[in-house]
Amino acid sequence: MSASAPGHAALRDLCARGVLLAASRDPDAKVTFLLTAPTTQSPWAGLVCKIPTTQPALAAVRREARALVDLRRMPLGRLTSTIPRYVSSGPAPGVPGAGGQQELEMLVSTQLPGRPMSQGYHQWRHTSRRGAVVADFDLALGWLESLWTETCTAPESLTWAAEVAEELSRRWDGSPLLGAALARLRTADSTMGAETCPRATVHGDFWFGNVLVEGGAVSGVVDWEASEARGWPLRDAARFVLSYSLYLDRHTSRGRTVPGHPGLRRGDNGAAVTYGLLGDGWYSRLVRARLAHGLRRLGLPAHLWYDVALTGIAEVAAKANDDDFGRDHLRLLVTLPHHPPKPGRRVR
Ligand SMILES: Nc1ncnc2c1ncn2[C@@H]1O[C@H](COP(=O)(O)OP(=O)(O)O)[C@@H](O)[C@H]1O
Ligand SMILES: [Mg+2]
């Protein structure tokens, strides 16, 4: 904790007034407090405390602290106001570390306005309506393209699929699904690997729950713990589109058709991603068009959209904190064809 930060007793008091956003039970679960202290004199007003509850979460929160400091040093233009500012990090009061011995650290950063895009997403029939979905894609992917504009470097050989293949092999060594998954990554690498692509700042977990929206604009992008200063920008585009697809059927009973998506029935985990990539409806056309658009913006051929999607799915399987989530993506990957079935479906 920095010298100017309030004492632990003050924090304990203010946490009682803040909004607690409990995290999942992931191995790297954190607890996030949005401190809404009512007194303007309070040094905690308008801040966010992220408190790790396990050792892996501690490492993640430390990474995020470093990333926020590094991001602040970059000339990001108008995007600067959409990224939390690092305030301090230090022992989290009353939160025992692993083994109950030592206190864990917490990260304090500035609170950004807006509400997570995930709130709108889960509202009644939001994702059934093309206009609402297009607006979400425009906002998130528009923000991402601004990040690319500010941070892109000279193109380099695009080794993303080969890198993911290595990671996947390490994570799923011994899995009966690994061979088929790697075969798909080899297919993706055979086309993508021949291209060059700029590197850029990568958020690393660019799903719609980490994008805050207010007044029809992106007001914040939070949760920078998996970010990379010079990564493959396609990673964030793929992650957004795939995660947006994944939950489309979440509010529909098993076996029933998802409202607004006549070609999609609630099925196994990942069914909606398959639909997003290979379906015939407006949503699938949107997914393909937006992946293709991102590729063009990076100077790459639009027909790589499917290879980007396969590699993005493999990357989730390789990096997921939660084993079940990772395994679901591995299973999904091996059910997908190496190429989209009809050449006519390819975006040019
Ligand atoms: N700087 C911030 N400003 C406003 N809300 C935030 C901020 N940081 C986090 N949040 C809210 O807290 C939630 C959880 O924080 P996040 O950093 O995404 O934690 P986790 O790593 O557990 O996903 C976010 O989805 C967002 O709603
Ligand atoms: Mg998050």
Image: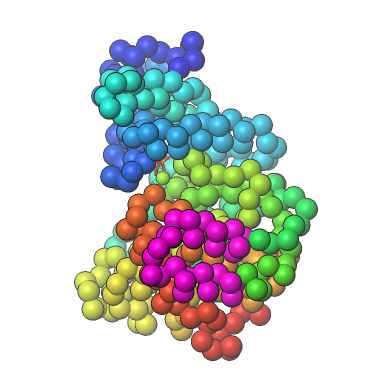
Instruction: Check the picture and name the quadrant holding the N terminus.
Output: top left
Q: Residue furthest left?
A: 253
Residue 134 appears anywhere in the view: yes
Residue 208 appears anywhere in the view: no
Return the residue nearer the eye: 145 or 266: 266
Q: In which quarter of the image is residue 155?
A: bottom right
Q: Which residues, given as a range, are shown in magenta?
A: 160-188
Decide if residue 129 is on the left or right side of residue 256.
right
The quadrant where ligand 2 appears is top left
Q: Which residue lies furthest to the front in this view?
A: 174
Return the residue nearer the eye: 10 or 198: 198
Decide if residue 101 is on the left or right side of residue 187.
left
Decide if residue 299 is on the left or right side of residue 328.
right
Looking at the image, residue 124 lies above or below residue 90: below
Q: Which residue lies furthest to the right in this view?
A: 154
Q: Quadrant of residue 228?
A: top right
Return the residue nearer the eye: 249 or 192: 192
Q: Which residue is drawn at 54% across and 89% down?
A: 342
Return the residue nearer the eye: 272 or 36: 272
Q: Quadrant of residue 23?
A: top left
Residue 236 picture location, percent across and down:
55, 56
Q: Which residue is drawn at 39% across and 49% down?
A: 321
Q: Check residue 162 for magenta coloring.
A: yes
Residue 330 picture location, percent across and down:
41, 66
- Overall secondary structure of the magenta section: helix
Q: Residue at x 44, y 68 (%)?
A: 178
Looking at the image, residue 222 lies above or below residue 250: above
Q: Check residue 134 for magenta coloring.
A: no
Residue 293 picture location, percent across and down:
63, 68
Residue 338 picture location, percent across and down:
53, 79
